[in-house]
Image: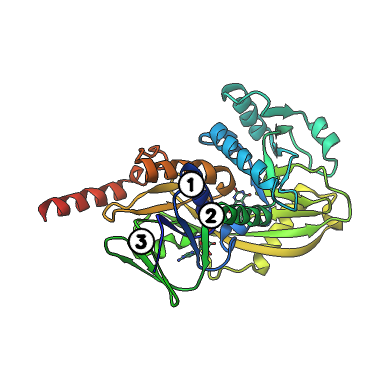
């Protein structure tokens, strides 16, 4: 039997960020990441991820944007230093206004949102035409120099290496069972691992864990296609419209993504490919005829009803934690939320209500019920 202070189930963005934040807060903590498959096997394996501070039809600033960007950028800097590849493409994110209504929404966002200096600017239609000649006609757009594109698989590989060098243990193994005695015990066919704290960071699979079956999580399948462009597209920003388009290198772009609330299997399919071809055609009509689809990828996002992540300690089981619901913002939120979770675990500091498990009334009811049962025993 191997003993740890914290076991984290799941080696995606949530699990790795939690391991890092814990290890950095207290170097003496013994942390184990137990990944059922491989690093990046879940939604985090997305071939190219966009980090966009202005979302929705009204281009609202995302929750805790400044702190989230600060932590992500710090992590990117650290991981870039140990990676063989360039992890990030610093060409910003463009949100073209595809009609006049959207243009007005975007201008309102610029006027009325307290955007930090230098993050965001309005581009007139001819300025956009100059920068991206093959982009469809639009009524101007928001350009976010703060936005970025991240080579997510390489980011995860660098993260894995960094954590191993920092003393975090990794186990890759198949099925296991979880037991709750005086400590949490995770047992696979070869070994058992115990710790007083167990964090479930298994993405959309979290609800398969018997303790977390009541979580308000939805699974949404997303497909993405990769295209080769013979024309140089190395200076293309990520583009957020009808989904998103994110460059991977000077001749390759990822186009995403589908949002499938009802799906039969988790794999990419022909229907998804057709939709993504259509997105590329609509966005870059002059480039599309030369582009060739060279790959396709799919993943399952875990989303919550209010689109913010969900973290916290179980309502009845001491030392059992959840970290899920990163939705489409895994890159932006993973570090910031993990830093809160790590202080919650190590220093018992309260979590912000916006991401706490107990902002959902069902979770609060279960906690009350568990308290009553406890009091009557
Ligand atoms: C099509 C698509 C496009 C996306 N684009 C972007 C983007 O542009 N920008 C962005 O920020 N985000 C994007 N995302 C979302 C982002 O990838 C997710 O928010 C994030 O990856 C979720 O991370 P996670 O660690 O919670 O879950 P996951 O990445 O799903 O990780 C869970 C891990 O747990 C493992 N696991 C499963 N069950 C168990 C178990 N029982 N025990 C142990 N391990 C287990 C899995 O193998 C997996 O490695 C996209 C997602 C999709 C699907």
Q: Position of residue 299 (x, y in %)?
A: 58, 61
- Asked if residue 30 shows in the view, the reply is yes
Going from N to C along the chain, the mark reached first, 3 or 2, is 2
- Which-is-in-front pick, marks 3 and 2? 2
- Asked if residue 326 shows in the view, the reply is no
Secondary element under disc 2, as helix, strand or loop, is loop
Query: Which residue sits furthest left?
Result: 376
Going from N to C along the chain, the mark reached first, 3 or 1, is 1
- Do the CB atoms of the residues marked 1 and 2 lie less than 8 Å apart? yes
Which label is found at residue 27?
1
Which label is found at residue 213?
3
Q: Residue at x 72, y 38 (%)?
A: 92
Q: Give the CA separation, mark 3 to mark 1.
A: 33 Å
Q: Residues within 10 Å of mark 1 (few under 14, many from 20)?
A: few
Secondary element under disc 3, as helix, strand or loop, is loop
Q: Residue at x 70, y 27 (%)?
A: 121
Figure quadrant of residue 95:
top right
Q: Nearer the viewer, residue 297 or 315?
A: 315
Q: Is residue 117 left or right of residue 353?
A: right
Q: Give the CA separation, mark 1 to mark 2.
A: 9 Å
Q: Is residue 371 left or right of residue 346?
A: left
Q: Residue at x 39, y 69 (%)?
A: 1
Going from N to C along the chain, the mark reached first, 1 or 2, is 1
Figure quadrant of residue 38:
bottom right
- Do the CB atoms of the residues marked 3 and 1 lie less than 8 Å apart? no
Q: Residues within 10 Å of mark 3 (few under 14, many from 20)?
A: few
Which label is found at residue 130?
none
Q: Position of residue 221 (x, y in %)?
A: 56, 60
Q: Position of residue 71 (x, y in %)?
A: 57, 38
Q: Residues within 10 Å of mark 2 (few under 14, many from 20)?
A: some
Residue topped by disc 2: 167
Q: Nearer the viewer, residue 37 or 361?
A: 37
């Amino acid at each position: 039997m191997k003993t740890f202070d914290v076991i984290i189930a799941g080696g995606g963005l949530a699990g790795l960020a939690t391991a890092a934040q814990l290890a950095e807060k207290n170097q003496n903590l013994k942390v184990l990441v137990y990944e059922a498959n491989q690093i990046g096997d879940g939604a985090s394996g997305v071939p190219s991820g966009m980090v966009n501070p202005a979302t929705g039809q009204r281009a609202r600033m995302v929750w805790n944007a400044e702190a989230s960007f600060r932590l992500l950028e710090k992590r990117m800097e650290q991981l870039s230093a140990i990676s063989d590849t360039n992890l990030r493409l610093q060409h910003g994110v463009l949100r073209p206004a595809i009609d006049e209504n959207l243009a007005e929404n975007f201008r309102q966002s610029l006027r009325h949102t307290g955007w930090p200096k230098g993050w965001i600017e309005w581009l007139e239609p001819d300025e956009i035409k100059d920068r991206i000649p093959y982009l469809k006609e639009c009524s101007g757009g928001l350009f976010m120099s703060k936005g970025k594109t991240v080579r997510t698989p390489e980011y995860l590989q660098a993260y894995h290496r960094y954590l191993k060098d920092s003393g975090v243990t990794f186990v890759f193994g198949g099925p296991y069972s979880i037991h709750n005695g005086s400590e949490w015990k995770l047992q696979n066919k070869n070994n058992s691992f115990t710790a007083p704290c167990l964090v479930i960071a298994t993405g959309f699979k979290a609800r398969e864990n018997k303790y977390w079956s009541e979580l308000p999580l939805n699974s949404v399948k997303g497909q993405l296609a990769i295209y080769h462009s013979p024309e140089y597209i190395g200076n293309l920003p990520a583009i957020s419209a009808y989904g998103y388009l994110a460059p991977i290198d000077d001749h390759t772009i990822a186009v995403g993504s589908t949002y499938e609330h009802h799906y039969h299997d988790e794999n990419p399919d022909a229907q998804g490919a057709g939709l993504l071809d259509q997105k590329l055609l609509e966005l870059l009509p002059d480039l599309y005829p030369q582009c060739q689809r060279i790959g396709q990828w799919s993943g399952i996002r875990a989303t919550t009803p209010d689109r913010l992540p969900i973290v916290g300690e179980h309502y009845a089981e001491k030392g059992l934690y959840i970290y899920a619901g990163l939705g489409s913002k895994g890159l932006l939120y993973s570090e910031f939320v993990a830093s809160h979770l790590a202080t919650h675990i190590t220093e018992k500091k309260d979590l912000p209500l916006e991401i706490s498990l107990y902002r959902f009334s069902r979770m609060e009811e279960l906690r009350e019920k568990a308290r009553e049962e406890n009091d009557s025993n």
